[in-house]
């Protein structure tokens, strides 16, 4: 499993982690097994959120007895992101996750509450040892500029460790400016919905054919090729969600797959990044 520093921390995280949105919708026992199998194979960055229903409970079950192995991330909803609201939401998440700390706690997306307040809330939690780091999600370049001002005002020495953003083969908007901006700020860029939230290029489609050709060269699966592309350089990470243990196994297999420059060019041409959108796409 390729690992790289997670933002400005010294922690090395696996390039492939595990998402948990809608994990509670199917066979829960199987989904918990998938998470544990993923952990066995090095997918030890787990992403969850207070928004994800019972997923936090299931993650708590999956990490029982092995909490220290995991880079555990949860997210606060923007409507709860006042200074006091962040503290209360974190307590609820900790209880559901059956742990006493989060590795990172993120603002799920930007809402109406002033960023300085949210940062104060995060810093309170850091001082209390309830979170090691904090970060953001769905923040565009302008949002990061505003955050930098808020962070300076709130006296936050650590700053955000990551920005979790939509990134898959057919949605490469972050490559226009955001990726470089995050790299400059030493933030990890954690790509969510790496399989297009279930809409992966099908076999037989032009893009699917390119993935299949590259996959055949490596004895790999097309999704593994996609994950390798999406994590091809620092500071990129991907967090596919897999409720099935077989899917978790396949995703973990992408952790050691390295594409050649020629293969990266082939994928780049098959899935062009397109024009820069007016605002950062999110789902
Ligand atoms: N910050 C945000 O605003 C935000 C937004 C969206 C998502 N996220 C995070 O990102 C995570 C991933 O995104 P996502 O859940 O939207 O979608 P995704 O990871 O792009 O796709 C998940 C789908 O792919 C399937 N899958 C996974 N591995 C597979 C494999 N090896 N072969 C075939 N199918 C496979 C899953 O099936 P099974 O489940 O049946 O295995 C599921 O149907 C979320 O779970 C969440 O943690 C964050």
Image (cartoon, rainbow, N blue to C red):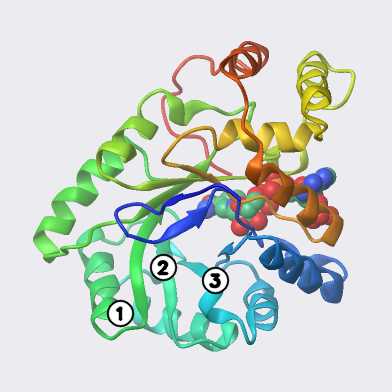
- Picture quadrant where residue 57 is located: bottom right
Q: Residue at x 79, y 22 (%)?
A: 217
Which of the two discs, 1 and 2, labels the residue nearer the N terminus? 2
Residue shown at 51% from the left, 35% from the top: 281
Give the quadrant of the C terminus.
Answer: top right
Residue 144, horizontal then vertical, whole percent: 27, 44
For label 1, the residue is 125
Above or below residue 8? Residue 60 is below
- SS for dot 3: loop
Read off the residue under disc 2: 105
Label 3 CB-ligand 1 distance < 8 A:
no
Q: Residue at x 84, y 76 (%)?
A: 29
Q: Position of residue 263 (x, y in %)?
A: 65, 17
| Residue 3 position within the rendered picture, expressed as x and y whole percent measured from the top left | 51, 50
Neighbour class for label 2 at 10 Å: few (<14), some, many (≥20)? many
Q: Which residue is mark 3?
A: 70
**Mark 1–mark 2 CB contact (< 8 Å):** yes
Relative to residue 206, is residue 174 drawn left or right? Answer: left
Q: Nearer the viewer, mark 1 or mark 3?
A: 3
Q: Nearer the viewer, residue 40 or 226?
A: 40
Q: Is mark 2 within 8 Å of ligand 1?
A: no
Is residue 244 in view? no
Q: Is residue 40 left or right of residue 105?
A: right
Circle 3 Cα neighbour tier, 10 Å, few/some/many (<14 / 14–19 / ≥20): some
């Amino acid at each position: 499993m390729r690992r790289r520093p997670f933002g400005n921390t010294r922690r090395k995280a696996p390039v492939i982690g595990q998402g948990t949105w809608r994990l509670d919708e199917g066979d829960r026992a199987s989904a918990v097994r998938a998470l544990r199998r993923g952990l066995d194979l090095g997918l030890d960055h787990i992403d969850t959120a207070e928004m994800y229903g019972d997923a936090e409970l299931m993650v708590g079950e999956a990490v029982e007895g092995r909490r220290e192995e995991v880079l555990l991330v949860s997210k606060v909803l923007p409507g709860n992101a006042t200074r006091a609201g962040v503290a209360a939401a974190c307590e609820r998440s900790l209880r559901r996750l059956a742990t006493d700390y989060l590795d990172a706690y993120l603002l799920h997306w930007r809402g109406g509450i002033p960023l300085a307040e949210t940062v104060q809330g995060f810093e309170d939690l850091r001082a209390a040892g309830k979170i090691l780091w904090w970060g953001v999600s769905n923040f565009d370049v302008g949002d990061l500029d505003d955050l930098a001002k808020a962070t300076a005002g709130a006296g936050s020495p650590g700053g955000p460790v990551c920005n979790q953003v939509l990134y898959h083969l057919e949605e490469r908007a972050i490559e226009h400016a955001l990726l470089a901006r995050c790299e400059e700020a030493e933030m990890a860029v954690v790509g969510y919905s790496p399989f297009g939230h279930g809409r992966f290029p099908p076999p037989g489609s032009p893009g699917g054919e390119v993935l299949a050709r590259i996959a055949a060269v490596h004895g790999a699966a097309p999704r593994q090729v996609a994950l390798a592309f999406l994590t091809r350089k620092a500071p990129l990470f991907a967090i596919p969600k897999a409720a099935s243990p077989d899917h978790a196994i396949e995703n973990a297999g992408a952790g050691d797959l390295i594409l050649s420059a020629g293969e990266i060019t082939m994928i780049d041409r098959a899935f062009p990044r397109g024009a820069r959108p007016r605002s950062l796409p999110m789902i």
